[in-house]
Amino acid sequence: MKEKEEDPRKELAKQVIEKYEFEKHDKAKENAIVEVAITERYDSQHMSETSEAATQTEQGKKNAGEAIGNLERILILTLVLQKNYATIGLVLAGKALARYKRLEEKNFAEYFLIGTFTSIIVAFLTGAIIEAIINL
C-alpha cells in the first residue's frame, strides 16, 4: 500500500513554527502567523498561475489577430491584382460586422481603424508594385 503524501501546507506550517521558535503559551500567535504564511504562499502561487493563463490567452488572441490581418492583406492584394475593387468593400464590411459591438469602445475603434487602413494601404501598394513590375 502506498504511503499517504503529506499535505504541503502542513510542511509549510512546520517550517514557520521552527523559524519563529514559538513558546507554548503563544499558540494563538503561532496559529495566526502559520495561517498568514500558508495563505500568502498559496495566494501567490494561484495568482502566478492565473497570470500565466491570462498571458497565454492574450498571446493566443494576438496570434489569431495577426493571422486574420495576414489573410486580409492577401485577400485584398488578390482582389487588387484582379481589379475587383468592389469586393474589397465586402471584405471590410464583413470585418466591421464581426467587430460591431466592440466598435462602440473608442480605443478599440481607433485601434481597429488604424489596423484596417494600414492593412489596406500595404495591400494596395504591394498590388501597385506588382502591377508595375508585370507591365514593364
Image (cartoon, rainbow, N blue to C red):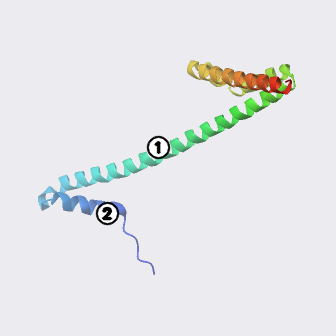
Q: Nearer the viewer, mark 2 or mark 1?
A: 1
Give residue 134's mark. Answer: none
Q: Quadrant of the C terminus?
A: top right
Residue 2 or residue 45, whichever sits in front = 45
Spot the residue most to the bottom: 1
Residue 31, x across and y down, in percent: 23, 55
Residue 55 or residue 31, whichever sits in front = 55
In the depicted structure, whether residue 65 falls above or below residue 87: below
10 Å crowding of disc 2: few (<14), some (14-19), many (20+)? few
Q: Is residue 119 left or right of residue 53?
A: right
Q: Is residue 118 left or right of residue 17?
A: right
Identify the residue at image location x=70%, y=34%: 70
Q: Which residue is mark 1?
A: 51
Residue 56 or residue 117, whichever sits in front = 117
Identify the residue at image location x=68%, y=26%: 99
Residue 16, x across and y down, in percent: 23, 58
Residue 71 image-quadrant placement: top right
Residue 130, x across and y down, in percent: 79, 27
Mark 1: which secondary structure? helix
Identify the residue at image location x=86%, y=23%: 135
* Amino acid beneath label 1: Ser
Q: Is residue 123 left or right of residue 84?
A: left
Q: Is residue 112 left or right of residue 22?
A: right
Mark 2: which secondary structure? helix
Identify the residue at image location x=36%, y=68%: 6
In the depicted structure, whether residue 70 falls above or below residue 6: above
* Amino acid beneath label 2: Lys
Residue 60 or residue 73, whichever sits in front = 73
Give residue 10's mark. Answer: 2
